[in-house]
Amino acid sequence: MLDVERAWTQQALMKAAVAGLSEAGVPEARRNVEWLLGAVLGCDRARLYAYPERSVPPEAVRRFDEMLVRRARREPLQYILEEAHFFGLRLRVTPAVLIPRPETEQVVEAALALLAGRPAPRVLDVGTGSGCIALALKHTRPDASVAACDVSRAALAVARENAARLGLEVAWLEADLLAPDFPGRVPGNLDLLVSNPPYVPPEEAPSLAPEVAAHEPHRALFTGPDPLGFYRVLVRVAPVLVRPGGHVVFETHAGYGAAVRDLLEAGGFEQARLQADLAGQPRIVSARRP
């Protein structure tokens, strides 16, 4: 994308990079360039603009060009930088895990509200991916006993690395929610069962951004033929795992939030509630086991 043999100033490099990403159809090209060049040079946005005529070392230009080529192919910025920010935590992310979304921070907020006043609560995060929900809960509630499971060993490796970097103790378990022995492989007597399972129907794949459809793990994104399949299993196992008076919190597809709430009510849960996300979409479902 860039002529890596020529001499570049920060200003000229940014201008050329923004033009290249814009031509490739990358949204917010300038902001992407700021993040990438800042990562290469080890500086913040303000320093990029404070010293526009500063020369960029050739090795830094080559590294920056490699990143630009990947971004022009619509690889997510977070995978290129190998990090994402979530609930005040800096997490490592790889193509083995979904990139944590701001909307999922609201799932954490809903979970924390339900845990308020409960000393040393027991929590299980099902389908943990990068570990974002489990780690945010443990960070905010150090007294909680938090476990998290995923069917993907690669995802669990990322989650464990994040926990080690943050110094947070979470029990990481390899377990498949859809397997008959799932309840026996995870802790019970829970105060909270939380999950952000796959909820995108496969037929919606063509409408997703290339960053999502072509790069994020499909196993963590897409449902099977039944868009409520994972939720039906969660509702079935929840009474076995959650103690009386405990809660469940699920992130859902906006089109199926009401249906998930209805599943919980039909499964004997009370105080079933459907909350809107940051965009006003009904996507966060919670309920209480009587």
Image: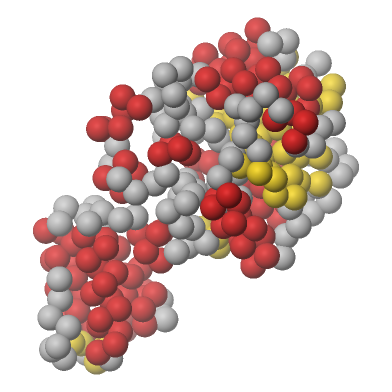
Q: In the image, 234: left or right of 186? A: left
Residue at 61% in and 62% down = 161
**Which residue is more in the foreground, 10 or 266?**
266
**Which residue is more in the foreground, 122 or 202?**
202
User: What is the residue that sits farthest to the top in this orientation?
Assistant: 266
Q: In the image, 159: left or right of 253? A: right
Q: In the picture shown, does residue 166 fall above or below 136?
A: below
Residue at 51% in and 28% down = 252
Which image quarter is the N terminus in?
bottom left
Image coordinates for residue 194, horizontal then vertical, percent: 66, 34
Which image quarter is the C terminus in?
top right
Residue at 56% in and 45% down = 152
User: What is the residue that sits farthest to the right in this orientation?
Assistant: 119
Residue at 31% in and 28% down = 204
Q: In the picture shown, does residue 258 fall above or below 212?
A: above
> Does any portion of residue 84 appear in the rendered image?
no
The image quarter in which residue 16 lies: bottom left
The image quarter in which residue 2 lies: bottom left
**Which residue is more in the foreground, 212 or 281?**
212
Q: In the picture shown, does residue 8 fall above or below 158?
A: below
Q: In the picture shown, does residue 137 fall above or below 221?
A: below
